[in-house]
Image (tube, rainbow, N blue to C red):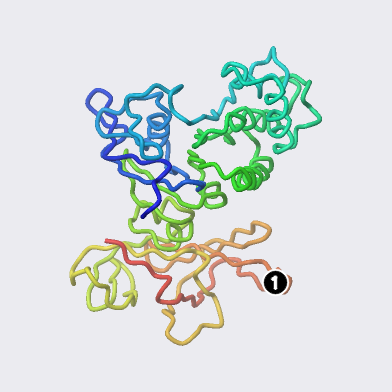
Amino acid sequence: MDAIPAVRLDGVSKQFADSYAVHDVSLDIDAGHFFSLLGPSGCGKTTSLRMIGGFTDPTEGAVVLAGEDVTALPPNKRNVNTVFQSYALFDHLSIEDNVAFGLKRSGVAKAEIRQRVGEMLDLVQLDGLARRRPRTLSGGQRQRVALARALVNRPAVLLLDEPLAALDLKLRRQMQVELKQIQREVGITFVFVTHDQDEALTMSDRIAVMNEGRIEQCGTPEDVYEHPTSRFVAAFMGTSNLMTGTYRNGEVALADGPGLPVGRRAGIADGAAVSVSVRPEKIWLSDFEAGMSVLSGVIRETVYSGPTTTYLIELAPGVTLSVLEQNTARSRMEDRWSGGETVEFGWRPEHCLVLS
């Protein structure tokens, strides 16, 4: 038998006045997974999270946790905990008392509270700060306290609403790795809301990309990045060169440029308007292989970014492609193009995606 999902959204919608924040979303989240709801502001990801937690009632559909329909249950009757962006810590309590707060309210014995709080503080690397107050901690440390307070209750599902958004870039990247390590160690299902594509790709087992209240695509990070199924996903997941044209006889004719060989594509009729997507890092500037699509264009801009250099190449009037090259140990500054040169570039056929 198939395992029962930790979380199931079954045709869930949430309507405010005349508009839908979430519209007919069906989704299964497997137990023990790190699952991310990803999308731009206003796409419905936080509303979806709030419906799982019981903070918002769905207009239609059902929320099912471990096989139990909890749609009508309040938050305190659901086996979930939530970590908010603001952390919501009690400044008048010590770190250990913050972490112990939920256990005390549940009537857990004092000896068990001490043991579980100690284990959680050790897990989040705060065991030496138990008597400190939240206001004396850094942003990253406060985030760890909020995480320990949620995990100490041993929920079946932990909901995280952009908990890293307030941290600076370097600390956020450090916490991404630590958060994933903690999730693997405790084995609890994490449902993580973010608008940051890199964050979702770094931590997730699976990602649901949301747009205008609906799920555009759901899959592993590699699936969603390498094989987007819509123009929105291709554009939202990192940087992608998107070109619009007409599909005919295995080529896409650009409005004002060359035909791009893409091969026969099942399900796409001749004469159909399509988008073509090629990631910047998939484009080669030298050492072309047999069977590659090789074109030429004019370099209009060179952007040096330390580990990488990005070239903006004009393929045709109004069509500029971004090409990313790694700056390796063999790279030399004098080998970089500065602009105005005509260059050849190409890509493998499998890296050219045709999106209807």
Which residue is nearer to you in this view: 217 or 102? 102
Give the residue at x 51% y 29%. Answer: 81
Q: Position of residue 109 (x, y in %)?
A: 66, 20
Name the amino acid type tagged 1.
Ser
Residue 262 higher or lower than 109, as above or below:
below
Give the residue at x 55% y 30%. Answer: 83
Q: Position of residue 164 (x, y in %)?
A: 59, 36
Residue 122 higher or lower than 265, as above or below:
above
Which residue is nearer to you in this view: 247 or 72? 72
Q: In the drawing, does residue 117 fall left or right of residue 231?
A: right
Dot 1 lies on which element?
A: loop
Give the residue at x 24% y 70%. Answer: 247
Residue 287 higher or lower than 205, as above or below:
below
Give the residue number, with chain letter if any, for mark 1: 331
**Residue extending furthest right?**
128
Q: Which quadrant is the C terminus positioned in? A: bottom left
Q: Position of residue 114 (x, y in %)?
A: 72, 25
Q: Which quadrant is the N terminus positioned in? A: bottom left
